[in-house]
Amino acid sequence: MYVLLSLSIRSPWFSSFIFISYLVCFLLTNIFVQKTMHQGVVRDMERQRVKRERELDFDMQRQLEAEYKLEQNVHNSLEPLGNNSAPPK
């Protein structure tokens, strides 16, 4: 009788322990996944910010180059200067 009573008392405690252990593991895994996903979002936002800054810098450099070409006479170094002109020594 004592053995049966003992098993009937232990069984709910054991199943409760298993259920709570599973629940804790599930919640910890869920928290870890959320933190990982949030870090990915932060990383993507930082990449987009850097990309926008680079595009703005590139546009500014393009505008400066256009102004420079308007103010100074610049020739393309890939094109030959002419058949009868020699490069300076």
Image (cartoon, rainbow, N blue to C red):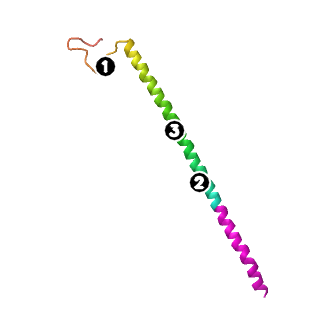
Query: Which amino acid, by three-letter code, is at mark 1?
Result: Ser
Q: Is residue 15 magenta?
A: yes
Say if the magenta span includes residue 17. Answer: yes
Local SS, label 1: loop
Callout count = 3
Q: CA distance from mark 3 to mark 1?
A: 36 Å
Q: Which residue is mark 3?
A: 47
What residue is shown with label 1? 77
Q: Which residues are magenta?
A: 1-25
Camera-nearest label, 3 or 1: 3
The foreground one among 52 and 32 is 52
The percent position of residue 55, horizontal first and vertical second, equals 46, 30
Q: Which residue is mark 2?
A: 33
In 3D space, how far apart are the residues under numbered discs 3 and 2 (Cα atoms)?
21 Å
Quadrant location, the N terminus: bottom right
Q: Is residue 37 above or below residue 19?
A: above
Q: Earlier in the sequence, mark 2 or mark 1?
A: 2
